[in-house]
């Protein structure tokens, strides 16, 4: 039986192989649209048919906007282009941030048979990373390891830093890396012409482009960790002698303790004053005779870290102090690339709870306010409304500066009284386990890690800490109590809501 007009199967269209497919993954503010516009202008100027589309991410930092470009040499018939990238079918993938490269690999956009992967190694932390109660920062080295397997060729460099060094934005340095990679069949001059055609910030963009082009010649050259800047207090000359004295006192502690104690001492002198540092060292010196040298002074070393964190709590005074420091404004200018002739506006969002306001009052007054529902309702009505303060302006800056100046009265506040009482109770709880189980005492010290932050974040941490301590009390008599204390702490750090901790506590209740 023969069917008239039947379609004869044919092989793939050889012209499909001429289509170059390029995807850019970028979040808001990283210039993904500008970069895509340059690529589109470049291709058209070189006689290519080109189509560019974009698919927005669901929300900020939960997914990048994907800009997708397909191009092919012009022919008699116009090519039919796809609207979105497909797994296993991307020639060039440009990621404007390290974890976006990781997401591209997970989605199958990067394959070893064809994909050139160009990525900036700087980090713009995702909301999920910031929400993690513990250290939620993803390991960028894992992305590099995955890229080495998944990509045909890699260009990894801190494109954000290159752009800032040249007074431009990351889209320009990424465009330079694309040109330097050789992934597109166009000369460097054609790329530069596309930038000039844009007509805005041309010279700065060309400098950043050149830096990105050079980086592509290296291939992979990147810092792969998120490091904090070194921290040290600023000590006035009049207090230098007293500072050197407490510093020598900390250095005299056993080596493993001294290293941590010096960091804690710096933090507390910066937070309050040298007397606060002396109080900190007295606490460590009290613990030291109870410690076990055979255990490497683990108890005192851990205490050196967490006592410093407990004493340098975040209150309204501390927040105002940090927001009014000249170094902070300098850092923001550097990050934003603000020039000498430009004016920078900084807006602070303030949302103190009634508890924070009461905590600033003298201890007796604050306690009376906390005990009165009407007073707390009034404080909430007056202060709990979210407000925005322009700290680059005189009036708002003066308000914050005056609040920061209250730190000389901090020891008399309700919040200080509460923090001191909690600190003493926590240390006594740890030391109560010391005669029977050294390791459990250390784990109780480490549990203080759960408490950090300000306002609601601090309240959630306190709640988790209390639940962990209650769980530890249920298993304290067991031989594996230290292990259970560690499990409880790690469960509390897994999610903001505390679901993992609920599960761990339920398990303990089943056998306790």
Image (cartoon, rainbow, N blue to C red):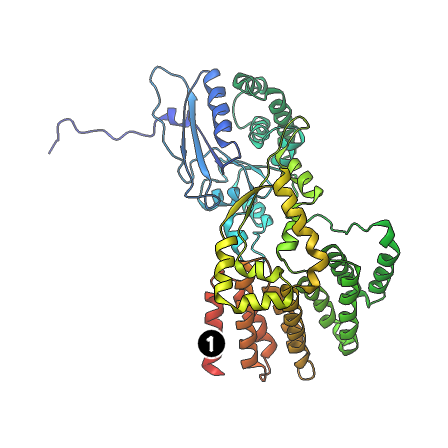
Residue placed furthest toward the left: 1
Q: Camera-side residue: 150 or 222? A: 222
Q: Camera-side residue: 165 or 53? A: 165
> Where residue 100 sits: x, y (%)?
51, 42
> Where residue 245 sits: x, y (%)?
87, 61
Badge 1 is on which residue? 507
> Image quarter for residue 73?
top left
> Image quarter for residue 397?
top right
One can see residue 439 in this view: no
> Image quarter for residue 506?
bottom left
Query: From the viewer's perspective, is 463 left or right of 281?
Result: left
Up-down: is 419 above or below 35?
A: below
One can see residue 174 in this view: yes
> Where residue 286 sits: x, y (%)?
78, 74
Residue appearing at x 46%, y 71% in the figure: 503
Q: Residues within 10 Å of mark 1 (few under 14, many from 20)?
A: few
Q: Camera-side residue: 22 or 493? A: 493
Where disc 1 sits, the SS reads: helix
Query: From the viewer's perspective, is 180 left or right of 18?
Result: right
> Where residue 179 sits: x, y (%)?
57, 26
Query: From the viewer's perspective, is 30 left or right of 431?
Result: left
Residue appearing at x 67%, y 45% in the figure: 324
Q: Camera-side residue: 446 or 11? A: 446
Quadrant location, the N terminus: top left
Up-down: is 7 above or below 267?
A: above
Q: How many numbered marks are there?
A: 1
Residue appearing at x 65%, y 72% in the figure: 421
Up-down: is 146 above or below 172?
A: below
């Amino acid at each position: 039986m023969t069917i008239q007009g039947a379609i004869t199967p044919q092989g793939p269209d050889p012209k499909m192989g001429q289509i170059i497919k390029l995807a850019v993954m970028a979040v808001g503010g990283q210039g993904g649209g500008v970069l895509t516009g340059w690529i589109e202008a470049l291709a058209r100027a070189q006689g290519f048919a080109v189509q560019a589309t974009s698919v927005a991410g669901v929300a900020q930092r939960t997914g990048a906007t994907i800009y997708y470009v397909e191009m092919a040499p012009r022919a008699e018939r116009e090519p039919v282009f796809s609207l979105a990238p497909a797994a296993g079918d991307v020639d060039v993938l440009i990621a404007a941030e390290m974890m976006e490269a990781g997401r591209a690999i997970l989605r199958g956009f990067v394959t070893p048979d064809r994909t050139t992967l160009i990525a900036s190694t700087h980090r713009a932390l995702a909301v999920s990373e910031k929400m993690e109660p513990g250290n939620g920062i993803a390991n960028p080295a894992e992305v590099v390891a995955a890229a080495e397997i998944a990509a045909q060729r890699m260009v990894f460099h801190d494109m954000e830093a290159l752009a800032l060094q040249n007074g431009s934005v990351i889209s320009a340095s990424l465009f330079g890396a694309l040109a330097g990679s050789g992934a597109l069949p166009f000369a460097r001059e054609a790329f530069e012409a596309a930038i000039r055609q844009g007509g805005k910030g041309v010279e700065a963009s060309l400098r950043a482009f050149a830096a990105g082009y050079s980086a592509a010649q290296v291939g992979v050259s990147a810092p792969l960790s998120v490091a904090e800047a070194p921290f040290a207090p600023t000590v006035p000359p009049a207090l230098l002698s007293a500072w050197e004295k407490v510093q020598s006192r900390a250095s005299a502690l056993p080596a493993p303790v001294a290293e941590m104690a010096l960091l804690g001492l710096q933090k507390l002198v910066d937070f309050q004053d040298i007397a606060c540092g002396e109080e900190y060292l007295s606490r460590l010196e009290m613990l030291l005779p109870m410690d076990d040298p055979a255990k490497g002074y683990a108890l005192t070393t851990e205490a050196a870290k967490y006592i410093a964190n407990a004493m340098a709590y975040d209150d309204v005074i501390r927040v105002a102090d940090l927001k009014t420091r000249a170094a902070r404004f300098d850092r923001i200018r550097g990050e934003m690339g603000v020039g000498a002739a430009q004016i920078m506006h900084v807006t602070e969002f303030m949302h103190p709870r009634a508890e924070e306001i009461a905590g600033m009052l003298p201890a007796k007054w604050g306690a009376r306010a906390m005990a009165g529902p009407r007073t707390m309702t009034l404080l909430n009505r007056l202060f709990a409304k979210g407000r925005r303060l322009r700290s680059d302006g005189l009036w708002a800056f003066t308000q914050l500066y005056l609040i920061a100046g209250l730190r000389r009265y901090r020891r008399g506040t309700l919040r200080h009284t509460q923090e001191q009482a909690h600190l003493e109770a926590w240390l006594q709880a740890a030391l109560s386990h010391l005669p029977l189980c050294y390791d459990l005492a250390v784990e109780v010290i480490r549990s203080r890690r759960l408490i950090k932050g300000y306002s609601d974040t601090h309240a959630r941490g306190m709640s988790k800490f209390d639940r962990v301590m209650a769980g530890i009390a249920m298993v304290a008599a067991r031989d594996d109590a230290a292990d259970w204390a560690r499990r409880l702490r790690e469960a509390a750090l897994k999610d903001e809501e505390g679901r993992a901790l609920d599960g761990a506590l339920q398990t303990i209740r089943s056998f306790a």
